[in-house]
Image: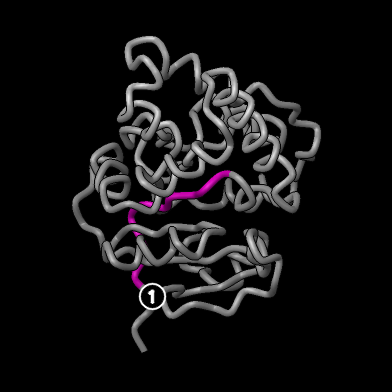
Amino acid sequence: MAPPTIPHTVFLDCDDTLYQNQWATAEKITKSIAACTAKLGVSPEKAYELYKTHGTCLKGLLKEGLLEKEKGVDEFLHQAHQIDYSDIAPDPELAAILKRITKPRIWVFTASTREHALRCMERLGLADLPIQGIIDTRTCDLETKHSPHSFEAAMRAAGVDDAAGCLLCDDSVKNIEAAKRMGWRTVLVGNVDRESRKQVVTPAAADVHIASLHSLPAEMPELFD
């Protein structure tokens, strides 16, 4: 049997993939976004409608003229991520594991902001992880992460055009399914669904399903020295 093909680029999601805290940090951001929209006079019901119609609430605010693009976006993103990060604990074991990935290039691919991802990585003890960069919501033109546009933007940012050589590690089934439709290889991280809080049934789109990134060396040894 031929050895597994080594991906040239690994894209690591941030929230509840790099770290796992039962979405405590993600839910703080959700509440912070609600507070930001309330300041704009947008009700929770309207914010949800914007999300459903436009893919993200922020995109909807812009499309419907509820937020000024020139300076409103950066201020909104800044305020939405002014949260307490104490729920994220250092993880020296994970740091040691990820530093052994030297063959493929590593990018962090987050639906949040670059600044948020950096704060998370610092809390985890990953500030010195040799990554190529961070692909965030700005890189993806504020599109939802599971849209084709976001994956195309990620590949452009990474300077790659071979989808088959890309690997996504993510806790979202929607993102895993989107990556698979784009021709990427996929690793679903986590055993519990955020919305239902029920056990995740491994989707067909997941090439590998692991409880946490700590299991990545056992399941994909080709990535490591």
Residue at left offset 31%, top offset 50%: 151
Pick whichever, 138 or 12, lies toward us: 138
Residue found farthest to the top: 71
Pick whichever, 145 or 154, lies toward us: 145
Please give the range of residues in magenta: 5-14
**Occupied quadrant, residue 126:** top right
Residue at left offset 31%, top offset 33%: 141
What element does badge 1 sit on? Answer: loop
How busy is the neighbourhood of tag 1: few (under 14 within 10 Å), some, or many (20 plus)?
Answer: few
Q: Is residue 168 above or below residue 209?
A: above
**Occupied quadrant, residue 129:** top right
**Occupied quadrant, residue 120:** top right
Q: Quadrant of the N terminus?
A: bottom left
Where in the figure is residue 51, as x and y percent of width and height? 44, 43
Residue at left offset 32%, top offset 45%: 150
Residue found farthest to the bottom: 1
Pick whichever, 78 or 157, lies toward us: 78
Where in the figure is residue 41, as x and y percent of width and height? 54, 21
What's under tag 1, amino acid-wise? Pro
Q: Is residue 150 above or below residue 63?
A: below
Where in the figure is residue 196, as x and y percent of width and height? 66, 66
Dominant secondary-structure state across the stretch colored magenta: loop
Residue at left offset 35%, top offset 61%: 179
Q: Is residue 14 left or right of residue 150?
A: right
Where in the figure is residue 180, as x and y percent of width and height? 34, 67
Q: Is 11 included in the stretch rendered in magenta?
A: yes
Residue position for label 1:
4
Q: Is 106 included in the stretch rendered in magenta?
A: no
